[in-house]
Image (cartoon, helix red, strand yellow):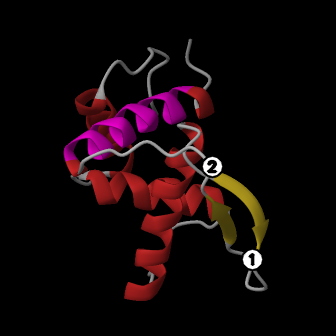
Amino acid sequence: MHSNKKIQNWTQLCFRLGEMFQMDLDTNGVFLLIGIREKGWGFREFSKEEKLNLIRLGSCTLLCELKQLERVTSDRDGWPVFKQPAFFPEWNEAQKEQKLKEAAVVYFNRIWKLA
């Protein structure tokens, strides 16, 4: 069980999730967990394609948190469809990774209802 203390940074988030799921997590692992949650699925064995789709869903969910994508609908298989807003800042890979990590901290603090 997680504590009720607000997560302050990426390292704390990975540590807390690692304790909860008894695994070491990198960026893709955190995105995978977000994707599983957003899809409403539980833990099970996933195909490589499913894992890639869940990681993408996790990163797109965080980009929505950053107002860089909008969820517009779902496709016939139930996967969300996203679109970019008219204004989309140009981030290099390091900036994008940092922004996504910050958004992940905010995301988990929000879903865990931590102040």
| Residue 16, image x, y percentages | 33, 34
Amino acid marked by disc 1: Gly
The residue shown at (64%, 61%) is 83
Magenta stretch, main secondary structure, is helix
The residue shown at (43%, 87%) is 49
Foreground residue among 103 and 87 = 87
| Residue 76, image x, y percentages | 79, 85
According to the picture, the residue beneath numbered tag 1 turns out to be 78
Q: Secondary structure at mark 2?
A: loop
| Residue 54, image x, y percentages | 49, 69
Label 2 crowding class (10 Å Cα cut-off): few <14, some 14-19, many 20+? few
> Vertically, is 93 above or below 8?
below
How many numbered dots are placed on residues in this image?
Answer: 2
> Vertically, is 29 above or below 62?
below
Label 1 crowding class (10 Å Cα cut-off): few <14, some 14-19, many 20+? few
Q: Is residue 108 magenta?
A: yes
Foreground residue among 99 and 105 = 99
**Residue 44 in sight from this viewpoint:** no
Amino acid marked by disc 2: Ala
Foreground residue among 88 and 94 = 88
Which quarter of the image is occupied by the C terminus? Answer: top right
According to the picture, the residue beneath numbered tag 2 turns out to be 86
Which image quadrant for residue 38?
bottom right
Question: Residues at badges 2 and 1 in contact (C-beta under 8 Å)?
Answer: no
The range drawn in magenta is 94-109
Name, please, the residue furthest toward the front: 86
In the image, taking residue 115 as reference, residue 5 lies left or right, namely left
| Residue 107, image x, y percentages | 53, 35
In the image, taking residue 92 as reference, residue 54 lies left or right, namely right
